[in-house]
């Protein structure tokens, strides 16, 4: 490398001593800013043969170190470096801190430069040098380029030493910059004393973490069931910041958003809410088919579950979550064991959920008796996992005393209680024989039914029970596919809706469904009751869509947070491609969502403001690893 034309011109004009300055670490989150200065005397020009660089910006870390060693070996290159630490940076600002580092470096020289080259628009007013040149890009000026290398290498070495003092942050790898690794460590451990409180990106065009969805049809599911064509929606952090016409939304936010999703030919709607399932039982998909509920559960499912453990619950739940996200579900209600494992899987993939802790008076693979079960549940409540629920199993396996204890714990901790109820005719007969009352009557008298109760199935309710249930304000999860497959019965949906009962939708488990596809559940629910009542008006498309969205939110007592697309609510939403043969032409969007949409039409899933799936690719986990792991379980090989 040789002197630049600007430097040669300065020497030609009679200036004898020139200097170049540059810095490193100005845009980092942690550690000092390093300011370096290089001084060159015209009367003692350095030998530059050993310094072979053309563009310092394109050097690798190894190449920078090699050049730095060559600089150290050349006696006629005078250089110095200084550091300004975060405590000082926080008191002033990063630009002034940079100038301070340069100033300190220049003051270390015995001779003052006659001419100074600066990288950027700094002026160094504190230093009495009248002659200076501002350059853009250090690769053109030798002295500035060398100063850049010195600053970078010196700061990198310092960050490696700091890594030994603060090993959990990984400073040796990311040098204090805002890499994914650094941000993950910051989130986990919080900042240390060398993190800058005043850090701000140096970019002139600052962007927020907003997401703009534009040119899209919005199915709001708000109280007016508003549909917005050519709509726009803005997400900030975990919530919907604004919603309206694209032209207004884009004009207001286009300079602030970080990501833009063009929804031409697409619709956006609230994420689907699956209010009943047994996630880990996806490991038993296809294991027990074509039998009634009692035989299915007591002779097939209950015995094989004895082989389950914590790892089966984790991986089986993760498999179910993948399936749900791929089909547009953004919130689930689980009904199973080892809910800390389900919680871990949900956090890994980024889905919202209610963790229903199953309890019954029979021994299970998770506990030997109810005493142990209640102890484990109380321990889980103390861990403050995501939303939890108490889940007494059903009348044939759970005593009324256990039901009442579950409700007491739920009330004390403001938790939901969910249970299977009146799923089969045999369950009703069991209840009448033991308690002399029907299932709803028993739970009502025991004080179990209220707004924070979610009943599942309810296939065999009479008119009196429907009236009691409506008065209690409890909600119901309707699982039509599972009820049809097990031939359990048909829930009296039209009568229950007429009575004012809040009805949501659930898939039940992959062992009794055998899928977790809520769009399939929606269509089935609509058609089942039409043919059962011999009345095509027994259900309608809007009713079914409500059950899969806002009614599900109400059932979980989350209607103020999710279930509709409204300003201020959580950003749980899905984008579907409507440019498909089976979705054209469009006369009625709601009709298509209930009767025509396939789960494969779901392109993008956003949960809590984070993009979990985009263009059908799930971002936060490796699907192939999960699928390979599922195949390893011996339970699948030894049926």
Image: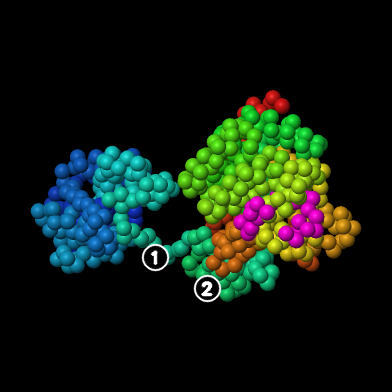
Q: Nearer the viewer, residue 380 or 631?
A: 380
Mark closer to the observer (2, 1): 2
Give above or below for 469 relative to 638. below
Alpha-carbon span between mark 2 and mark 1: 19 Å
Q: Which callout, 2 or 1, points at the residue further toward the start of the chain?
A: 1
Query: Few, some or many C-alpha atoms within 10 Å of disc 2 (few <14, some 14-19, many ≥20)?
Result: few
- Is 466 in the magenta? yes
**Labelled disc at residue 195:** none
SS label for mark 1: loop
Residue found at the far top of this picture = 638
Q: Nearer the viewer, residue 67 or 164?
A: 164
Residue that numbered label 1 is attached to: 204
User: Residue 24 appears at what percent x and percent y?
Assistant: 29, 52
On the picture, is 533 further left or further right than 263?
right
Query: Few, some or many C-alpha atoms within 10 Å of disc 1 (few <14, some 14-19, many ≥20)?
Result: few
Quarter location, residue 154: top left
SS label for mark 2: helix
Question: Residues in magenta?
Answer: 445-468
User: Residue 425 appears at what percent x and percent y?
Assistant: 81, 45
Residue found at the far front of this picture = 436
User: Residue 479 appears at what percent x and percent y?
Assistant: 74, 49
Quarter location, residue 472: bottom right
């Amino acid at each position: 490398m040789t002197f630049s034309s600007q430097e040669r011109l300065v020497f030609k004009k009679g200036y004898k001593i020139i200097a170049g300055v540059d810095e490193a670490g100005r845009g980092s989150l942690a550690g000092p800013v390093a300011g370096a200065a290089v001084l060159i005397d015209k009367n003692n020009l350095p030998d530059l043969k050993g310094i072979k660089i053309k563009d310092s910006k394109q050097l690798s870390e190894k190449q920078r170190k090699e050049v730095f060693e060559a600089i150290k070996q050349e006696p006629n290159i005078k250089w110095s470096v200084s550091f300004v630490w975060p405590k000082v940076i926080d008191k002033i600002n990063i630009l002034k801190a940079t100038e301070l580092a340069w100033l300190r470096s220049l003051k270390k020289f015995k001779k003052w430069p006659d001419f100074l080259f600066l990288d950027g628009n700094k002026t160094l007013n504190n230093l009495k040098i009248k002659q200076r040149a501002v350059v853009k890009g250090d690769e053109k000026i030798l002295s500035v380029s060398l100063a850049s290398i010195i600053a970078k290498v010196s700061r990198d070495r310092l960050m490696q030493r700091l890594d030994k003092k603060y090993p959990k942050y990984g400073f040796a790898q990311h040098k204090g910059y805002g890499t994914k690794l650094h941000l993950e460590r910051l989130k986990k451990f919080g900042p240390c004393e060398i993190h800058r409180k005043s850090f701000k990106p140096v970019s002139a065009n600052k962007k927020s973490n907003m997401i703009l969805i534009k040119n899209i049809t919005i199915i709001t599911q708000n109280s007016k069931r508003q549909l917005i064509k050519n709509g726009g929606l803005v997400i900030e952090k975990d919530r919907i910041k604004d919603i309206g016409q694209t032209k207004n939304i884009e004009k207001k936010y286009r300079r602030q958003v970080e990501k833009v999703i063009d929804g031409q030919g697409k619709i956006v709607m609230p994420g689907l809410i699956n209010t009943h399932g047994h996630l880990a039982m996806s490991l038993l998909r296809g294991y027990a088919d074509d039998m009634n509920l009692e035989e299915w559960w007591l002779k097939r499912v209950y015995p094989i579950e004895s082989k389950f453990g914590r790892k089966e619950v984790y991986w089986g739940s993760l498999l179910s979550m993948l399936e749900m996200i791929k089909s547009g579900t953004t919130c689930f209600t689980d009904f199973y064991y080892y809910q800390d494992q389900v919680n871990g899987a949900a956090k890994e993939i980024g889905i919202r959920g209610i963790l229903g802790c199953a309890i019954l008076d029979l021994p299970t693979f998770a506990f030997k008796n109810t005493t142990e079960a209640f102890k484990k549940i109380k321990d889980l409540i103390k861990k403050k996992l995501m939303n939890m629920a108490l889940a007494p199993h059903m009348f044939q396996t759970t005593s009324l005393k256990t039901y009442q204890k579950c409700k007491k714990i739920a009330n004390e901790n403001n938790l939901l209680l969910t249970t299977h109820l009146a799923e089969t005719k045999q369950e009703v007969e069991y209840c009448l024989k033991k308690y002399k009352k029907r299932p709803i009557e028993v739970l009502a008298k025991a004080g179990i039914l209220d707004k924070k109760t979610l009943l599942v199935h309810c296939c065999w309710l009479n008119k009196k029970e429907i009236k009691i249930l409506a008065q209690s304000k409890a909600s119901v999860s309707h699982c039509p596919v599972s009820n049809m497959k097990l031939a359990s019965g048909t829930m009296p949906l039209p009568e229950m809706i007429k009575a004012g009962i809040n009805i949501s939708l659930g898939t039940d488990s992959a062992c009794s469904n055998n899928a977790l596809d809520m769009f399939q559940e929606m269509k089935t629910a609509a058609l089942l009751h039409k043919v059962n009542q011999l009345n095509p008006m027994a259900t309608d498309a809007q009713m079914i869509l409500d059950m899969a969205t806002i009614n599900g939110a109400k059932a979980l007592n989350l209607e103020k947070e999710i279930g509709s697309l409204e300003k201020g609510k959580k950003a749980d939403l899905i984008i579907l491609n409507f440019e498909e043969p089976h979705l054209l032409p469009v006369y009625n969007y709601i009709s298509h969502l209930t009767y025509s949409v396939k789960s494969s039409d779901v392109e993008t899933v956003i949960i809590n403001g984070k993009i979990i799936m985009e263009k059908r690719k799930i971002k936060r986990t490796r699907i192939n690893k999960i699928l390979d792991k599922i195949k390893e379980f011996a339970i699948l090989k030894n049926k």
